[in-house]
Image (spheres, coloured by chain):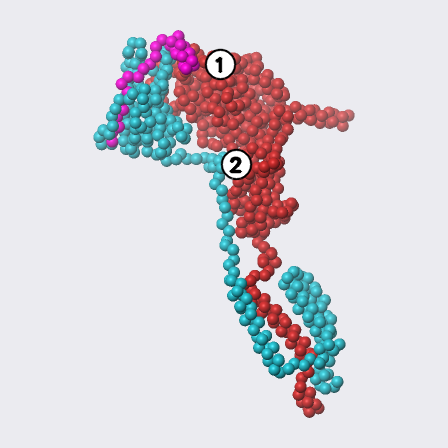
Chain colours: A cyan, B red
């Protein structure tokens, strides 16, 4: 308040007179000249927000006078300021004033002037800024206006990298689906079923193994068992190279043991022993 | 003798480093126009010298000291206080100044309503200047000064300014800002101000005409910049100030219309500390990545690995001239990209370990050459960027699960066959065949 008072005091000393706004009036009409709304503007209280369609025209008229003499004057600066409070966008439109102080401004939304800022769903605050070299300046908040939303202005290609970007989550392939373990167990049992038949038949026939621990048979049987163990080990842990190495090492004694076993069996079968 | 002199040079260099207030060195070249008096800027220059900068003065047309020798900059920072100089010595051209910036030299440039080589340089930085000889005018607020001497409120939205700076006095030319995101607006014009060349009220029609013609347009309103910074991709900084008086002792001491002292000296100091890389200077010290529960970076990752990525960031502290761990970035993001980002996740600071930012994520189930990309750009701050290439491979032949329940029948089949073969071999070799022998003996 003190600040404003001191400015007023300054105004009194520096500039002789101040400017004032007379008979401000607005009219909104459609493209076929039908009047939608027309009213005088109060400088103390903002009217209901104005709404302008895509082809409507807003007409604003007022007169600027000298406070002391009441005569119309043409100030240096007569700007309409359109300001979007939310986005911070601003547009300044100079208004032509006659030497008699009369001013008329037309905003045709079919051909909007370049000074109108990019608009969104939010209203624009419209104010009138008056400035002069000889008079004290003035600023009037006139009204709020809803304009049709404009296209978003072109962005610099690098603009996005200056903001937080949306997070991206990778969509993983779904986990492999396995059949129920019960079904797997049933089929495993089915695979084993021939053993039942085999053992049953053997039971009937009666198997005799008199030479099982014969010194010429046992080494081969043990080595063959070694191969089986090696293959199981391969499945569980070993790498291919290791399997080939160990298998190769096992193969040589197995070859001789096998030859010996076959020879011995042949002798038995031929009845020589 | 040579050894002694080199040791002396090394000592000098060390001494120079240890006193630097700026993270990029403390030697400053001031190009001061011959028409300007150094004493008029004593508060600004004195403040710089007090903070440890060594100032070298030179007139724009002097040939020495040269800005660069054999394309190597001789100074860490250059101040252009020659807003009206139309011609410079041969080593100063817009091209050479762009070259300086890419060599990480910082520039502070004062402009004026006059057209000079520096105004055409400003155009290259997306600043759109009004026609020559149209200074900024504002009839608001009512004051005893000329309309071209304007108190401008300092917005607190710029991170490089000390909060709560009182309005500053300004006179000079405004500029419109292009949409380049590298621009850092520092001081915006008041909403009531505009650029015009008229000196009395009869110029009103000229302003409307210029706007309606559309060719020149109108430089008006708070979207215009008065002082604007620009940070290049190599993190060198340049500031364009619309007028030189902003830095003058006269404006620093001049009272505002409200009777309080102006904010010019603090504002000029804030600009200088930013442009000379004292404030908002960040760097990535190191990045590391490894599988979870490991510490060493592997040669390659397998798809679906859980990866831990850590970045260490520090900021420059001009009071102690050291880099200190900095955990103040809340919106750091990490991208894991192969051509396109497959994963973009936030990289939050680790509580309790200053300067460290860490995230754990699962590698995508796509194999290829991936990059960890850290690219943080915010207006006013040094840009942080880092890229680390790692291969992501599918699992090896033995990297898949071994014992699937779905394969139980196959396992039992294989084991059963093996066991059957073993059993058969043992039985056949060890068994006794009845009747066979009789047959054999018969034949014999």
Label 1 Cα crowd, 10 Å radius (few <14 / some 14-19 / many 20+)? few
Left or right: B163 as drawn, with respect to A8: right
Left or right: A193 as drawn, with respect to A139: right
Residue A147 sits above or below residue B435 on the image: above
Residue found at x 27% / y 31%: A56
Residue B294 pos. (x, y %): 64, 47
Residue B401 sits above or below residue A146 on the image: below
Numbered label tally: 2
Residue B354 pos. (x, y %): 61, 34
Residue found at x 58% / y 48%: B306
Identify the magenta region. A1-30
Q: Is residue B52 visible?
A: yes
Residue B440 sits above or below residue A22 on the image: below
Label drawn at residue B260: 1
For disc 1, the chain is B
Residue denoted by label 2: B331
Q: Magenta span has A53?
A: no
Residue found at x 64% / y 82%: A206
Q: Is residue B185 visible?
A: no
């Amino acid at each position: 308040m003190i600040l404003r008072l001191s400015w007023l005091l300054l105004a009194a000393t520096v500039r002789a007179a101040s400017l004032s706004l007379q008979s401000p009036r607005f009219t909104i009409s459609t493209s076929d000249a039908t009047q939608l709304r027309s009213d005088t503007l109060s400088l103390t209280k903002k009217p209901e927000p104005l709404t302008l369609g895509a082809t409507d025209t807003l007409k604003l008229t007022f007169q600027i006078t000298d406070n002391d003499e009441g005569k119309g004057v043409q100030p240096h600066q007569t700007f309409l300021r359109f300001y979007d409070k939310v986005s911070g966008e601003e547009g300044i439109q100079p208004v032509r004033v006659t030497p008699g102080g009369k001013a008329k401004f037309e905003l045709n939304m079919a051909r909007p002037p370049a000074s109108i800022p990019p608009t969104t769903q939010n209203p624009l605050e419209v104010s009138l800024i008056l400035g002069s070299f000889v008079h004290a300046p003035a600023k009037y908040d006139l009204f709020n206006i809803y304009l049709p939303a404009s296209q978003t202005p072109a962005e610099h290609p690098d603009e996005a990298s200056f903001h937080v970007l949306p997070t991206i989550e990778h969509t993983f392939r779904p986990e492999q689906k396995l059949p129920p373990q019960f079904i797997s167990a049933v089929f495993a049992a089915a695979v084993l079923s021939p053993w039942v038949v085999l053992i049953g038949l053997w039971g009937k026939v009666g198997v005799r193994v008199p030479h099982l621990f014969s010194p010429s048979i046992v080494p081969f049987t043990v080595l063959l068992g070694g191969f089986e163990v090696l293959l199981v080990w391969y499945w569980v842990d070993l790498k291919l190279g290791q399997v080939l190495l160990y298998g190769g090492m096992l193969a040589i004694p197995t070859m001789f043991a096998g030859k010996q076993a076959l020879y011995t069996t042949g002798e038995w079968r031929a009845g020589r022993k | 003798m040579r050894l002694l002199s080199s040791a002396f040079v090394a000592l000098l260099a060390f001494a120079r480093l240890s006193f630097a207030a700026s993270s990029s060195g403390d030697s400053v070249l001031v190009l001061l126009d011959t028409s300007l008096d150094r004493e008029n800027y004593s508060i600004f220059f004195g403040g710089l010298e007090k903070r440890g900068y060594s100032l070298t003065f030179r007139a724009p047309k002097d040939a020495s000291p040269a800005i660069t020798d054999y394309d190597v900059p001789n100074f860490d920072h250059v101040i252009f206080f020659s807003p009206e100089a139309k011609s410079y010595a041969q080593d100063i051209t817009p091209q050479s100044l762009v070259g300086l910036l890419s060599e990480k030299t910082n520039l502070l440039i004062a402009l004026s309503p006059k057209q000079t080589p520096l105004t055409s340089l400003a155009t290259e930085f997306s600043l759109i200047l009004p026609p020559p000889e149209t200074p900024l005018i504002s009839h608001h607020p009512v004051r005893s000064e000329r309309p071209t001497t304007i108190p401008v409120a300092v917005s607190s939205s710029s991170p490089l300014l000390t909060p709560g700076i009182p309005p500053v006095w300004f006179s000079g030319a405004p500029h419109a800002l292009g949409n380049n995101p590298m621009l850092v607006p520092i001081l915006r014009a008041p909403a009531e101000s505009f650029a015009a060349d008229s000196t009395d009220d009869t110029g009103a029609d000229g302003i409307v005409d210029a706007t309606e013609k559309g060719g020149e347009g109108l430089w008006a309103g708070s979207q215009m910049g008065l002082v604007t910074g620009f940070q290049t991709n190599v993190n060198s900084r340049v500031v364009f100030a619309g007028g030189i008086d902003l830095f003058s002792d006269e404006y620093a001491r001049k009272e505002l219309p409200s009777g309080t002292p102006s904010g010019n000296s603090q504002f000029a100091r804030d600009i200088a500390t930013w442009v000379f890389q004292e404030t908002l200077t960040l760097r990535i010290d190191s990045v590391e990545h490894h599988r979870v529960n490991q510490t060493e970076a592997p040669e390659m990752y397998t798809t679906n690995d859980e990866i831990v990525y850590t970045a260490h960031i520090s900021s420059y502290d001009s009071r102690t001239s050291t880099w200190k761990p900095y955990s103040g970035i809340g919106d750091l993001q990490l991208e894991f990209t192969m051509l396109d980002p497959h994963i973009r996740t936030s990289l939050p600071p680790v509580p309790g370990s200053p300067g460290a930012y860490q995230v754990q994520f699962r590698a995508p189930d796509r194999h290829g050459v991936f990059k960890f990309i850290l690219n943080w750009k915010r207006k006013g701050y040094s840009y942080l960027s880092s890229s680390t290439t790692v291969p992501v491979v599918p699992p090896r032949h033995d990297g898949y699960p071994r014992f699937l329940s779905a394969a139980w029948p196959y396992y039992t089949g294989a084991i059963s066959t093996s066991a059957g073969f073993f059993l058969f071999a043992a039985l056949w070799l060890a068994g006794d065949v009845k009747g066979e022998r009789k047959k054999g003996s018969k034949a014999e």
